[in-house]
Image (cartoon, rainbow, N blue to C red):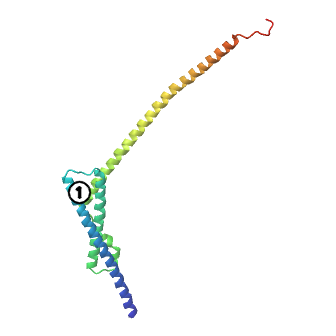
Amino acid sequence: MLNFQWKYEGYLEEEKTIINRGLENAKRLAAWYCERLKSIEKRSSLLDRGLVPVDDAVHEEKLNYLRAHIAELNRRIISLMESSDHSFPTHSNLQVRTQMPQPNDEQSQYYRRQNIKLCQELADKNHLIERLLYENAEKNKEYNSAFRKVEPKRLTSSSTTTTTNVEKNQYAQSHSWVQSEGTLM
């Protein structure tokens, strides 16, 4: 009996430690929420003065991140509070996922619309990349064909030039005056 009581006291101490740690994190979370609300109020006042953030996409991504994580956090907190209110049979440990409230239709519709929008943007970008690659290939073909037309002319004209220079040198050597000093002539 004493061993059981000692074990139970250990469980209670561990539970107390876990709850205190959760309470500290909840206080930090509440402070973070307050800080975020102040930031929103500040940005709202800037917006009223006509100062608009530059990058809309970054703000939208940040909002999507917050929406998803806070919704998941809220579902987990609600699930934890509801499971603590009732008796906690061991089989419910396995069913925590099914007990969590599902996202509302408005949120899932938003994600579907966002997914469709992103898929369309991706398809447009892929189409643009394909078009640019095709145009690049066409320009390379034009460049290579123009280079082939110019290159043989260069070789022909330079070989002709060298041939004529050699002929001129041979002609000049054959018809050049040779000094006749010391000869019988």
What residue is rendered at 70% in x and 12% in y? 174
In the image, 185 versus 29, the foreground residue is: 185
Residue 42 location (% of width, % of height): 22, 59
Q: Residue furthest front?
A: 181
Q: Quadrant of the N terminus?
A: bottom left
In the image, 145 versus 43, the foreground residue is: 43
Q: Residue furthest left?
A: 48
Q: Residue furthest bottom?
A: 1
Residue 132 location (% of width, % of height): 40, 39
Q: Quadrant of the C terminus?
A: top right
Relative vertical location of residue 42 with respect to residue 86 in this rendering, above or below: above
Q: Tell me the crowding category of disc 1: few under 14, some 14 to 19, or many 20 or more residues within 10 angstroms, Cα based.
A: some
Q: Secondary structure at mark 1?
A: helix
Relative vertical location of residue 110 with respect to residue 140 in this rendering, above or below: below
What residue is rendered at 45% in x and 30% in y? 142
Q: Is residue 104 visible?
A: no
Relative vertical location of residue 22 with respect to residue 47 in this rendering, above or below: below
User: Going by the image, does 106 lie left or right of 185?
Assistant: left
* Identity, as a three-letter code, of the amino acid under mark 1: Arg
User: Going by the image, does 46 lie left or right of 129?
Assistant: left
Q: Which residue is mark 1?
A: 43
Residue 147 location (% of width, % of height): 50, 28
What residue is rendered at 36% in x and 91% in y? 5
